[in-house]
Image (cartoon, grey):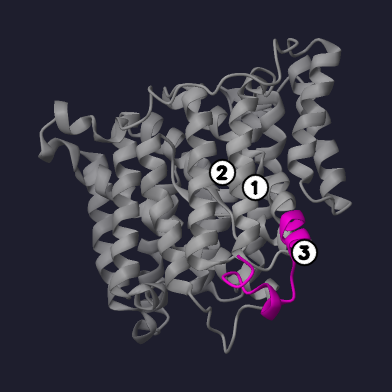
Amino acid sequence: MKGYFQFQELGTSYTKETMGGITTFLAMAYILFVNPSVLGPAGMDEGAVYTATALAAAIGTIIMGVIARYPIALAPGMGLNAFFTYSVVIGMGIPWETALLGVFVSGIIFILITVVGIREFIINAIPAELKFAAGAGIGLFIAFIGLQNAQIVVMSEATLVEIGQLGNPATLLSIFGIVLTVILMSLGLKGGIFYGMLLTAAAGVLTGVIPVPGAIVGSVPSLAPTFGAAFEPFGTTALGDIFTIELMIVILTFLFVDFFDTAGTLYAVANQAGFVKDNKLPRAQRALLADSSATSIGAVLGTSTTTAYIESTSGIAAGARTGFASLVTGALFLVALLFSPLLAVVTESVTAPALIVVGVLMAGSLSNIDWKRFEIAVPAFFTVVTMPLTYSIATGIALGFIMYPITMLCKGRGREIHPIMYVLLVVFVLYFVYLGE
């Protein structure tokens, strides 16, 4: 075991790796409760989603540890789960089973891209500014959903949205959770979001806002409601009616966000651990293959896109350097299957602070955009702003990809535009034409 994970070469030990794996788990364990609450409104069984989330995270993380030997954990991604529910299922009216099929197909395409080795070609085709804008826009979208779930922001006939009744007990609990989580994160506490959720739930139970749970440990929720549902459309719908232009755009968006989010996360985590040599990441293809495989596996189990988590940096900071830490994290996700009764106390008031704080973290990529260049600022602005305003990540990405070639051409920088961007321009214009029919 020590030889396979190169303990001696990397100057690590079982103790360091175990502590690193535990730290990473605590930093990202919030997804076990947040993901069911986000996918629930899509019509999916929250108990089954809890089990699918834990299994997808465990399997994906263990694959990453064994195959790529990196201390990087995976789980259903924030942002992509919101896109799945609010943009695809609720916004476009696509059944959640078909949406899961879209996730599965995006994972298969990701695998093919990785195996064929055209990753760098695709990464270089998309401008960095649009990648940063997409990440920030998703962050604002997630935060907006969190503010709505907390009822801090509510509907208004006059102004579309307005501030809610802050004296509402559930809203007060969310405000308490936001302040508490911000304090924990500001103090640099590893797993601050997770601990914030636990303490907020405890406060809710003590004040009577949330009912007392019947148990803490219980049986594993059945996976039957979601397992294999991604393939159900094949038995009831003609192939041409399944793979519509709308669904193809959904698949493209799943692939785009997962692909670049994974590439950025892998590089950031590996760079902190000192794995990057000459601006290259060793075993990068294996890491990407682990991530893409986890996406397809997660879709079969019944959850949205599974991807690498930036929270893995907390485990690295605690000493993790090898894939053994990922084995520890994966094992803890399996143990977490027994704690599903806690779903009863993790209400929207409890998960809202997590969504808002994650949104804050994702919005940090705004600093990487050159706002002084108008030709860059315009597509970035449209990407960021339209995601929360239209309640659609796909719309934000589409508008950004349409505006970028236009502003660059007008600025006389047409030679800097990759041919793929022109293809995507046409695709997204057709997408809006399709929506307008």
Q: Residue 381 at x, y = what percent?
A: 53, 59
Identify the disc placed on residue 141: 2
158, above or below 102, in the image = above
Residue at image position (65%, 17%) is 344
In the rendered structure, which segment of residues is drawn in magenta? 1-20
- In contact (CB < 8 Å): disc 2 and disc 3: no
Of the two numbered discs 2 and 1 on the same chain, state the one appearing first in sequence.
2
Of the two numbered discs 2 and 3 on the same chain, state the one appearing first in sequence.
2
The three-letter amino acid code for the residue at tag 1 is Gly
The three-letter amino acid code for the residue at tag 2 is Phe
- In contact (CB < 8 Å): disc 2 and disc 1: yes
Of the two numbered discs 3 and 1 on the same chain, state the one appearing first in sequence.
3
Identify the disc placed on residue 359: 1
Q: Residue 345 at x, y = what percent?
A: 70, 19
Between residues 166 and 212, which one lies in front from this camera angle?
212
Disc 2 versus disc 3: distance between alpha carbons?
A: 29 Å
Residue 155 is one of the magenta-drawn residues: no
